[in-house]
Amino acid sequence: MANVGDSTAVLGTDNGASYTSKTLTVRHNGHNAEEAKRMKEGYAGKVNLKDGAHEDGYLQVVTGPWQGYELSVTRALGHKHMSDHGVLTEPYVVTFEASKDDCCLVMASDGVWDVMDGQEAVNRVMEAASEGKTAAQAAKMLVEEAVELGVKSPCGEADNTSAIVVFFA
């Protein structure tokens, strides 16, 4: 599995009486310590990283025609305007072998992960599965719940939100 950006993949495992989650990918943004270090060391003077305790982790261009432009990710596919400012196209790659107890894979954008963690997402989609819902229906339900939680959050808005769910037979 490969990823860039701030979407995340989580593997769910059935332990009999409960489910566990394991995050398989990394989020490429200013809150990722390795990415923050790379940006600060390699692109100082080109971008500021807004990564303080109360900051959003965004990159902010400080020079040239893109001055003032902000981006939330440190890696992306084909973001030609930000490649000179440290945004890489190189994905994080992980391989894993699913076990007989693995029950689902949840891949979602930060709009989901900003309002729930991997364990909550796995629990929600497996509850949907126990109700006879398909993976597509579980993904739709997860997105709808994430949007609702985002709107009810202190900032009062939901981020772009998408999800794919795979159930293992």
Image (cartoon, grey):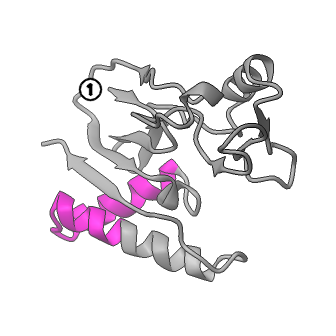
Q: Quadrant of the N terminus?
A: top left
Would you identify the image quadrant in which residue 74 lies?
top right
Among all residues in the image, which is located at the extreme front? 65
Would you identify the image quadrant in which residue 21 lies?
top left
For residue 35, above or below residue 50: above
Few, some or many residues within 10 Å of mark 1 (<14, 14–19, 20+): few
Q: Residue at x 80, y 43 (%)?
A: 51
Residue 57 rendering spot, x and y as whole percentages: 72, 46
Residue 49 rendering spot, x and y as whole percentages: 78, 39
Q: Quadrant of the C terminus?
A: top left
Residue 82 rendering spot, x and y as whole percentages: 57, 35
Q: Nearer the viewer, residue 52 or 84?
A: 84
Q: Residue at x 83, y 28 (%)?
A: 45
Span highlighted in magenta in the image: 118-142
For residue 46, above or below residue 132: above
Q: Is residue 62 left or right of residue 92?
A: right
Whether residue 45 is visible to the viewer of this picture, yes or no, is yes
Q: Nearer the viewer, residue 32 or 21?
A: 32
Q: Residue at x 65, y 44 (%)?
A: 66
Q: Is residue 81 left or right of residue 140?
A: right
